Image (tube, grey):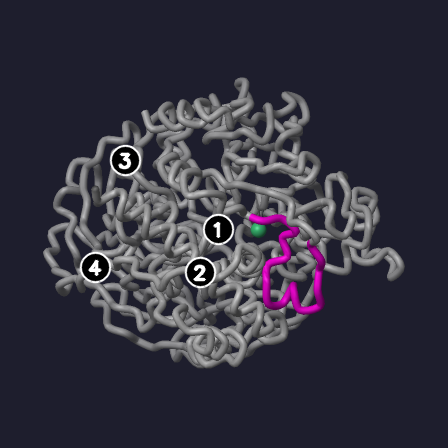
Amino acid sequence: MTRGRTLNFWAALALVPALVGCGSGVPAPSPLATQGVTDAMIAAGNGDEWLTYGGGYDEQRFSPLTQITDKNVGQLGLAWSADMDTARGQEATPLMHDGTLYVSTAWSMVKAYDAKTGALKWSFDPEVPRETLAHVCCDAVNRGVALYGNKVYVAALDGRLIAIDQKTGKQVWSTKAVPDQKNYAITGAPRIAKGKVLIGSAGAEYKARGSIAAFDAETGKELWRWHTVPGNPADGFENDAMERAAKTWAGKWWEVGGGGTVWDSITYDPASDMVYFGTGNAEPWNPDVMSRGDGDALYTSSIVALNASTGEYAWHFQETPEDRWDFDSDAQITLADLTIDGKPRRVVMHAPKNGFFYVLDARTGAFLSGKPFAMVNWAKGLDPKTGRPDILPEARYEKTGGVFIGLPGLYGAHTWHPMSFSPKTGLVYIPTNNTAMAYKAAENFEITDIGGQMGLDFGAVAMPADAKVRSDVKAATTGALMAWDPVAQKEVWRVDYPGPSNGGTLATAGNLVFQGTAGGEFRAYAADRGTPLWSFPVQTGIIAAPMTYAIDGEQYVAILAGWGGLWDIFSGVLASNSGPPRNISRLLVFKLGANGKLPPAPPMNAMVLDPPAFTGTAAQVAQGGNLFSRYCSGCHGDAAVAGAINPDLRHSGAIASADAIKSIVVDGALKHNGMVSFKSAVKPADAEAIRHYLIKRANEDKALEMAARK
Ligand code: CA
């Protein structure tokens, strides 16, 4: 029992003050060539095609296909594979329509393949400026495209929403979907609602005011936009919802945007014409910075429902009031019809980063139930009537001035990695993380003009702490595939993994759940019992979710493999529990009876730390650590322990030379790699402090490595 062991560990350290612990498979009528993908086709959810992000409007990621079952899945083999022309993170779920598989990859590129043979039909590159990465928290990822009519829609990292011709791969229109391209970025998949393309953005760690907007699918014209947090009251409020929200803020939050970004889930219910989406953390995290106060900071870390036609507010449910822990509520929102207390209910199911599983009434947002599905120590529990968390005083780190070891931490108990729901078993399959994070209010923190554009404006530091705490955190960090009963609000079965950030899930009517692991396997389990039935070594970590489709009577299962994203930043500290997260970006497609082979895997790079001797001062280390946390950790990892994609600077030869570090950090010598100049924020003396911090960190970890070898 991993969870039990982990709990005992934390309890022993006295760091845990409280624990709360469809379709038939019959092909749809062939659409008119001019009509393309229609609302009716998406709503019908014919199992042969996978037409929309989440598999259907309800985001259940459940397929009615039954050719591959718990009886024959052992015969599943590789039908074809395609290597991606990028080594950055891969988070997308492919879509399949009319024999073509559409997939987005890193840098918001889109590829179209013959879904049966794997032949590349076209490739689209929006040519995202590489310096965009300087204000993106978690890699140049993209989670998916949308299909409607004869077009493919992709939201590019730099904030453009782009329509592409399905047949030719040529751009039809492009529009700017965000206010500026210095603070906002887009990684999520667009959602289609009756001829409108809905998209939000990321950026709540920079200077962003969250919003969701609707665009005409034919022309790209913006139809409505709804902000998630109020702007400057002096400018007047856009609507009553903003006026009400302003009462829950203090200080001058609008000067840094306020956060609440809609960076992942956008779910649509055609029956009610409502759109549901999750919002991110308040900006800044620390309520003392900008004096944003102890109010709820609406509508951050919430689920919000709007009328999709007009963009008018319908309801909201805030999962994490006064969020200071980065508990974004952006994770996938799944709609389902459940029987609760003997009555059929249309519900919203949600498993956000904060560790509680919520069931809400989909029409009203009324709280029906909520229970922790992972380790939680920031709240005693939820009010049984309202669902409001009872926040523990020690979790308010800016008040105590001390370090708060939060469970879960900013990694989240569950975040964008898609979950699935099987109406057949009644279970939700959640890629769950047990992770911790150390929070401490930043001292003498000031928001700067460039801070929000080049660095992370937390107002709090995720403390590297000392080596012992880091290694204890690593030992306590695990992952699991959790089968959760949303009616009883309890775990039914689980499969434990050594590390977090395993892939998203797919449930099928063949009594199967598919999931890739961070450790490099694509697996199938029995959906009702969790029995492992099949696995395929993919040579790389998987974080994306699989999907399935059928052509000419054959069922296929596809997965985009490749490590990356937020987890790459922390993989050295946390996910390396799963093994070295080598990144090979590759689309893999399986069917029964196939026996394809992958090319031989490149060797793992086992790197041994060999830093120069430490010659800096304690003051330089402290200053360098703060600067690193703010400007560098977003790519190069917490405590300078990086993952598979961005360089681990403890190993960098450049840290031996003050000139080399200055030329990179200040002069931008490596800007073609996405490592742009930070000279507007980092002076040469700052770069030197960062260098001494890196040398110090490398020597600390070298000592640990040597001790471990004895
Ligand atoms: Ca966030």
Q: Neighbour class for label 2 at 10 Å: few (<14), some, many (≥20)? A: many
Relative to 91, 389 lies left or right: right
Q: Is residue 387 visible?
A: no
**Residue beneath disc 1:** 43
Q: Pick whichever of labels 3 and 4 is earlier in the sequence.
A: 3
Q: Nearer the viewer, mark 3 or mark 1?
A: 3
Estimate the x, y position of residue 20 in percent, counting from the top left.
Answer: 52, 23
Magenta extent: 445-461
Instruction: Return the mark for residue 694.
Output: 2
Q: Nearer the viewer, mark 4 or mark 1?
A: 4
Mark 1 beta carbon near ligand 1 (under 8 Å): no
Estimate the x, y position of residue 146 in percent, counting from the top left.
Answer: 47, 62
Relative to 526, 474 lies left or right: right
Residue 474 position (above or below residue 225): above
Question: Furthest-top residue in view?
Answer: 341
At 39% from the left edge and 66% from the top edge, which residue is drawn? 105
Q: Neighbour class for label 3 at 10 Å: few (<14), some, many (≥20)? A: many
